[in-house]
Image: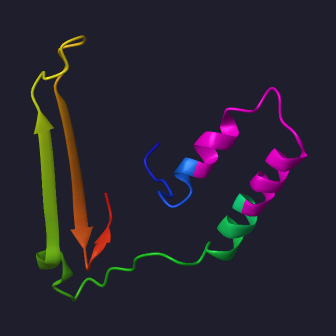
Amino acid sequence: MIYTHSDISHGVSVVSRFIKNHSKAHWQVIKWILYYLRNIAYIGLVYDKGSNIISNVESFVNSDYASDLDSRRSLTDYVFILLECAID
């Protein structure tokens, strides 16, 4: 997946656990998610070629080098912020 709506990712994740054994309440949540997506379909970030907006990008990185004693895996997290909004 390249694009995502981070504002609904948790709700979709929870509802997707009940795909095989869903109830009326789960369908109600799915309808609310679809209703929300329909109402925000035209909302997004717009970049103008003439603006110098790219100079306002901030980035943050967090690294953890093999501190998990069981798996010994290294983890890296990052976030890019543009105009006080997380964009990646």
Q: Is residue 19 magenta?
A: yes
Quadrant for the C terminus in the image: bottom left
Q: How many marks?
A: 0
Q: Quadrant of residue 35?
A: bottom right
Question: Which residue of the protein is positioned furthest toward the bottom in this rendering?
Answer: 50
Residue 13 versus residue 34 in the image, above or below: above
Q: Is residue 14 magenta?
A: yes
Please state if 86 lies on the left or on the right of 53 as rendered.
right
Q: Nearer the viewer, residue 52 or 43?
A: 43
Q: Residue 2 placed where, x, y %? A: 43, 47
The structure residue drawn at horizontal position 53% and vertical position 50%, both measured from the top left corner, is 9
Q: Residue 17 placed where, x, y %? A: 67, 32
Q: Residue 30 placed where, x, y %? A: 76, 52
SS majority, magenta: helix
The structure residue drawn at horizontal position 80% and vertical position 46%, both measured from the top left corner, is 26
The structure residue drawn at horizontal position 15% and vertical position 78%, both measured from the top left corner, is 56
Question: Which residue of the protein is positioned furthest toward the right in this rendering?
Answer: 24
Please state if 74 lies on the left or on the right of 38 as rendered.
left
Residue 31 versus residue 22 in the image, above or below: below
Q: How is the image coloured?
A: rainbow
Q: Nearer the viewer, residue 85 or 2?
A: 85
Please state if 87 lies on the left or on the right of 51 as rendered.
right
Question: Which residue of the protein is positioned furthest toward the top in this rendering?
Answer: 70
Q: Quadrant of residue 41?
A: bottom right
Q: Nearer the viewer, residue 26 or 86?
A: 26
Q: Nearer the viewer, residue 27 or 39?
A: 27
Span highlighted in magenta in the image: 11-32
Q: Residue 29 placed where, x, y %? A: 76, 54
The structure residue drawn at horizontal position 12% and vertical position 21%, both measured from the top left corner, is 66
Q: Quadrant of residue 54?
A: bottom left
